Image (tube, grey):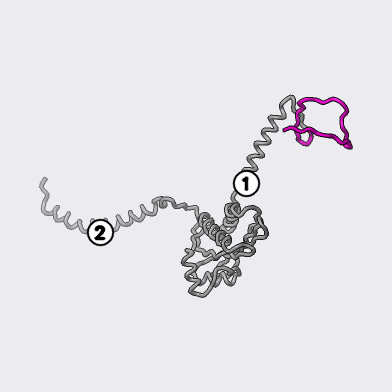
Amino acid sequence: MMLSPMASVSRTRHRPALRAACRLFFPGLLVAALLAAPPAWGADPAQPARELIAVLDLQAVGATEVEAAALTERLRETLLKTRRFTLVDRSQLTAVLNEQALQQTGCTSQDCAVQVGRILGVRKVVSGRALRLGERQWVLSTLLVDVETAETLRVESVRFQGSFFDLMQNGITDLARKLAGLPSAPDARSELAKKNQMEGSAFLAANGKRPSITTTSSGLQYEVLRRGTGKSPTSSSIVTAHYRG
C-alpha cells in the first residue's frame, strides 16, 4: 500500500504527542495497580502496628539474680510473640545504659523508666519486680510506662503458685498477654482438668444406668457385690472394715 507524502508527514507529527500521552498514562496505570494490589505475603491488615518498647530487667526480691534474669528473658520472648511489640535489642539496651552510668536492675519506678526510655528513644518501657514469697509462691509485678507523657499505662501483676518451670511457662505468658491488652491464654492444667471432668461425668452417666449400681442423692455411686448378714451398724457403732480395691 502506498502512502501519500501528506499522510506520512501527518503520522510523523503525531508521534511526539503519542509518546507524551504514554508517559502520562502508563505511570498512572502502574500506581493504580500498586494501590489495588493485595498486601504483601504474611501481612495482616487487621493486625495493629507494632510498638517499639524496652523491657528492663526484673528486680529480684526474695529470688536469685539468675531466676530474675531467666524470667526477664522469658517475658521479652513472650511479649514479642504477642505481635504487639518490637523490642530494643538487649545488647543495645545494656550498652546505652552503661554509657549513661545507669543500671537496669532496680529501675522499677516510673521516673526511672521514663529516663531510660528517653535515652533509648522508645515510646514505652516495661519494668517490674519478681517476688518470691515461698518455695512455690511468686508474684510478678510490672509497669508499662509511656515515655512521652510520663504516664503509667498499665499496672499488671500475676500471683502464681507452682514450680519455677510452670511459672516460666504459664505465669509469664499471662503477664505478657495482660501487658499487651490480650485475654489470658487458657492454662494447660485447667484445660486438662476440664477434660478429665467431662470424661468423669460421661463415665458416671453411663455407669449409673447399670441395674446393679445405686446412685445416692449426692451423686455417689456404689455396687453391692455380696450382701452381708447380721445386724446393720448405726452411726454410733464401732466397726472393722475389710477393704479391697
Q: Nearer the viewer, residue 41 or 68?
A: 68
The magenta segment is 216-245
Q: Quadrant location of residue 243?
A: top right
Q: Nearer the viewer, residue 4 or 53?
A: 53
Q: Earlier in the sequence, mark 1 or mark 2?
A: 2
Q: Residue at x 50, y 72 (%)?
A: 98
Q: Nearer the viewer, residue 95 or 109?
A: 95
In the displayed structure, 126 sits above or below 165; it is below
Is residue 149 magenta-colored? Answer: no
Q: Quadrant of the N terminus?
A: top left
- In percent of width and height, residue 81 lies at 51, 54
In the displayed structure, 225 sits above or below 87; it is above
Numbered label attached to residue 20: 2
Q: Residue at x 63, y 64 (%)?
A: 61
Q: Quadrant location of residue 214?
A: top right
Q: Which residue is identified by label 1? A: 189
Q: Quadrant of the C terminus?
A: top right
Q: Residue at x 39, y 51 (%)?
A: 37
Numbered-mark total: 2
Q: Residue at x 64, y 63 (%)?
A: 62
Numbered label attached to residue 72: none
Q: CA distance from mark 1 to mark 2?
A: 71 Å
